[in-house]
């Protein structure tokens, strides 16, 4: 099955850019997703990218996909304290099954 | 529009006791998922329903876990008997099936289980 890996923790200052990275193993993934989880809450879809795209921008969010290296990143511009959360990368493998990474905890400091 | 509703939010039980979780998906969503989220981990799929049919239950430990989705709307997930290792958050999610993008899952807030 698909394996999705992420670094565990990232700390940035408010106003700086955050870059959260993810690697996946299933090259047949059609879509790749970024979800956000705030404390005590469920996951919320932030954005997704189709596998034939290299980049997708949505307001402060930029997703970059390197299919050759199976590397996905999420850049958050002008990071705010409200962006503090856990960010999960997810790949859609066989049988339309989502596999989530372990999550990256983003801490935004003043 | 109401989101995915789960109950209870928190449950503390002793090992070997039974426990049940309930989920009400977003109205009109045919696909319902139960995920297990251990501390510090990402969600792992337990079971996926298309309407009332379980189309993927390969990760559901069937010796102690059971799930049902009668009438293709609400769903319950049961553990009997619970073990210490079952302590986790149980997340329910739903999505509108038939779209080209199957990753737009809408999650509930989860049911946190503590087994003592």
Image (cartoon, grey):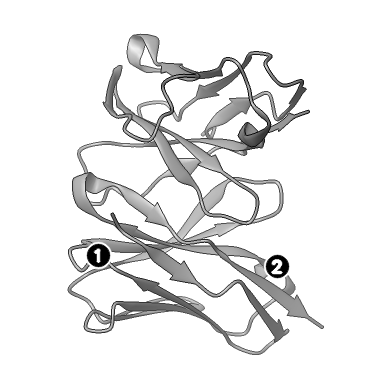
Q: Quadrant of residue A68?
A: bottom left
In the picture shown, does residue A49 fall above or below B60?
Answer: below
Q: Nearer the viewer, residue A25 or A96?
A: A25
In the picture shown, does residue A36 fall above or below A68?
Answer: above
Q: Are marks 1 and 2 on the same chain?
A: yes
Q: Could one spot residue A24 in this view of the protein?
A: yes
CB under 8 Å between discs 1 and 2: no
Q: Quadrant of residue B47?
A: top left
Q: Could one spot residue B74 in this view of the protein?
A: no
Q: Count neighbours of disc 2 (C-alpha within 10 A) and say few if under 14, some if 14 to 19, many if 20 or more.
A: few
Please state the horizontal and vertical placement of residue A52, each as a whole percent of the image.
Answer: 17, 73
Please state the horizontal and vertical placement of residue B112, each as a whole percent of the image.
Answer: 68, 35
Q: Which mark is residue B47?
A: none
Image quadrant in which the C terminus of chain B is located: top right
Chain letter for mark 1 = A
Q: Counting residues from the N terminus, which is met first, the one under dot 1 or under dot 2?
A: 1
Please state the horizontal and vertical placement of residue A39, each as a whole percent of the image.
Answer: 71, 53
Q: Secondary structure at mark 2?
A: helix
Q: Quick check: A27 left or right of A13?
A: left
**Residue position marked by numbered label 2 in the rendering:** A82
Name, please, the residue furthest toward the right: A110
The structure residue drawn at horizontal position 65% and vertical position 46%, both measured from the top left corner, is A41
Q: Quick check: B45 left or right of A20?
A: left
In the picture shown, does residue B18 fall above or below A65?
Answer: above
**Residue position marked by numbered label 1 in the rendering:** A26
């Amino acid at each position: 099955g698909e394996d999705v890996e992420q670094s565990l923790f990232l700390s940035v200052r408010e106003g700086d850019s955050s870059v959260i990275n993810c690697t996946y193993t299933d090259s047949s993934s059609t879509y790749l997703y970024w979800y956000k989880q705030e404390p005590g809450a469920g996951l919320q879809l932030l954005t997704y990218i189709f596998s034939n795209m290299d980049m997708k921008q949505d307001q402060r969010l930029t997703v970059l996909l390197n299919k050759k290296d199976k590397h996905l990143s999420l850049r958050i511009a002008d990071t705010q304290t409200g962006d503090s959360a856990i960010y999960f990368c997810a790949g859609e493998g066989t049988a339309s099954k989502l596999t989530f990474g372990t999550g990256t905890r983003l801490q935004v400091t003043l | 529009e109401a989101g995915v509703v789960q109950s209870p939010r928190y449950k503390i039980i002793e090992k070997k006791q039974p426990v049940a979780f309930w989920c009400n998906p977003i109205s009109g969503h045919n696909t319902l998922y139960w995920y297990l989220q251990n501390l510090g981990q990402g969600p792992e799929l337990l079971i996926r329903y298309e309407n009332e049919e379980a189309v993927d239950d390969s990760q559901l430990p069937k010796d102690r876990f059971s799930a049902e989705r009668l009438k293709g709307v609400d769903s319950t997930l049961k553990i009997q008997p619970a073990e210490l290792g079952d302590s986790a958050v149980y997340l329910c999610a739903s999505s509108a099936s038939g779209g080209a993008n199957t990753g737009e899952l809408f999650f509930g807030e989860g049911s946190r289980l503590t087994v003592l």
